[in-house]
Image (cartoon, grey):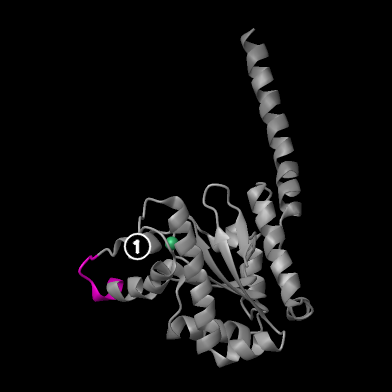
Amino acid sequence: MKYKVILMAVFTAFIFSACQPKAQETVESKLVKETLTKETRDAMTPDDVVKSFMDGNERFVKGNLTQRDFVAQAKSTAGGQHPKAVVLSCIDSRVPVEYIFDKGIGDIFVARVAGNVEDEDVLGSLEYAAGVAGSKLVMVMGHESCGAVKSAIKQVDVGSSNVDHLLGQIQPAVEKVDGERNADDKNYVANVIKENVHLTIDHIRERSGILKSLEDEGKIKIVGAYYNLGTGKVDLLK
Ligand SMILES: [Zn+2]
């Protein structure tokens, strides 16, 4: 009896180890190693890029993310990059931009600052992405329940001129949205977050001649978006 148990154990271990490389091969064969080339990126229109974002977000929502070989992608982009878009997003840990659009290494530039507001440094980064590196889309993305926006609504004072400056950047959106200034009112907060995205886009157009010209010439698109925390879905803003 003892021998039978040992034999079964040895046999099972043998079968298991024999199967291992095969399972590994199947996983590896599904891994995407390629990265975005200049030719592929340049052939895309701004609308193609928007579509690739929304398709990627649909895969994220469905739990169907592309499997990537990040080591191979890191190697293949080491000599250069040709990202198709630049996203200005919040620093919030619940908004991992590449994941929610199912993008890999070399696909997109991401600028992140609390409350996704613009200043000279952010504008310079967006201009570099679209004006120099050739990205076709500038996306400003706010998100549900943004702590920075809630803090601006509550006029939080933490005794820091840096935080005051940042929250001051969001204040115009708070002032523009009608309703009681209540950071616990989800609808009101969502409206301020969306207004903040719209105002940021207005400022980008006003303060960056480069991006305004590229947009007027149809070479890039500047769009606003809103990320829903619970569902993972991104809505484009009109
Ligand atoms: Zn936020």
Q: Which residue is mark 1?
A: 153
Residue 161 magenta: yes
Q: Quadrant of ligand 1?
A: bottom left
Residue 153: percent from the left, percent from the top?
34, 62
| Nearer to us in this view, 40 or 72 | 40
Can residue 66 be seen here? The reply is no
Q: Is mark 1 within 8 Å of ligand 1?
A: no
Is residue 12 placed above or below 203 in the rendered structure?
above
Q: Give the quadrant of residue 134.
A: bottom right
Q: Residue furthest top?
A: 1
Residue 143: percent from the left, percent from the top?
50, 59
| Nearer to us in this view, 234 or 184 | 184
Is residue 94 placed above or below 35 in the rendered structure?
above
Q: Residue at x 55, y 58 (%)?
A: 227
Residue 80: percent from the left, percent from the top?
64, 81
Give the side of residue 232 with respect to residue 14, left or right: left
For the C terminus, the quadrant is bottom right
Which amino acid type is marked by label 1?
Ile
Helix, strand or loop at mark 1:
helix
Q: Residue at x 63, y 80 (%)?
A: 79
Looking at the rendering, the stretch of residues picked out in magenta corresponds to 157-163
Q: Residue at x 68, y 81 (%)?
A: 220
| Nearer to us in this view, 1 or 211 | 211
Q: Give the quadrant of residue 209.
A: bottom right
Residue 175 magenta: no
Is residue 200 placed above or below 90 in the rendered structure?
below
